[in-house]
Amino acid sequence: MSLAALQQEFMGHVLDEERPLPRHWDARMGEGLAIYRNAYRTRLIDALRETSPKTALWVGDEAFAQAAAHRLILHPPQGWTLDLIGEGFVETLEELFAADPDVADLAWLEWAMHLAFTAPDCPPMDAAGFAEATSDFGEEDWATMRLAFMPSLHVRAVSRDCGALWRALEREEPPANAPLPESPMHCIVWREGLEPVFAQVPARDGNHLAAMRAGSSFGEICAALAEELPADQAAAEAGAMLGDWIGRGIVQGVSSGLPVAG
């Protein structure tokens, strides 16, 4: 058996506790594997805790370790870097803490900030750049305009004020309960320079940001707003949202016609 095959066989035993041991292994070798498996899993749990320290603080070390082990046993990491160890962990927390949605919202915020920090560098489009890029736009160009967003941008609908919870945990003053937002909210995460940042925005803004990020045109956003608001108010709202996105530095580029990558 080749070295690569031996390594693959060994990792198969590390990741699957139910996998029968090779016939030539004795009890001592099985005990050694169990020790190695435990050390391996402990290191992965520690890596998950390093990407989600506030979530671990919020739920407690024991509950976090159990949730992390649950994730790692059912979905062993497939990547070559620990930078992606948290991939899919939010979904596991949504399942395990279904009665406490603040847990998954907080974990998503931490994971999104982690991804924002490691996202590729590229300059955002500022107001002057946007004005120049759209200076010769006609009515059809505005209707078909699409935006490319920064690679560091992430958007999620949240059921709790995860931003307030994050800040409280940052001060090591966790509230007794995660506060509810006054109205449905979205949380957006991006990077300013080298620093991941976040903000919570009204659900309408978050929904339309997510739609444009998924490839919707500006005309489609305006049409959706026109179904909710008077025509003049819808136009003003669309312009305000666009200005807010550019002002935050989350827009990378603009085009009219076909969807742009981003």
Image (cartoon, rainbow, N blue to C red):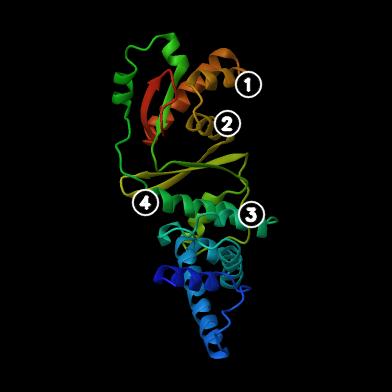
**Could you give the CA–CA distance between mark 2 and mark 3, rounded to whole angstroms?**
23 Å
| Residue bearing mark 3 | 94
Residue 209 percent location from the top left of the image: 50, 32
| Residue bearing mark 2 | 204
Residue 35 percent location from the top left of the image: 52, 83
Q: Nearer the viewer, residue 34 or 30?
A: 30
Disc 2 and disc 3 in contact, CB within 8 angstroms: no
Q: Nearer the viewer, residue 133 or 228?
A: 133
**Could you give the CA–CA distance between mark 1 and mark 4, rounded to whole angstroms?**
38 Å
Callout 2 amino acid: Arg
Q: Residues within 10 Å of mark 3 (few under 14, many from 20)?
A: some
Task: Give the mark nearest the N terminus, 4 or 2.
Answer: 4
Residue 193 position by quadrant: top left
Residue 7 position by quadrant: bottom left
Task: Give the mark nearest the N terminus, 2 or 3.
Answer: 3
Task: Give the mark nearest the N terminus, 4 or 3.
Answer: 3
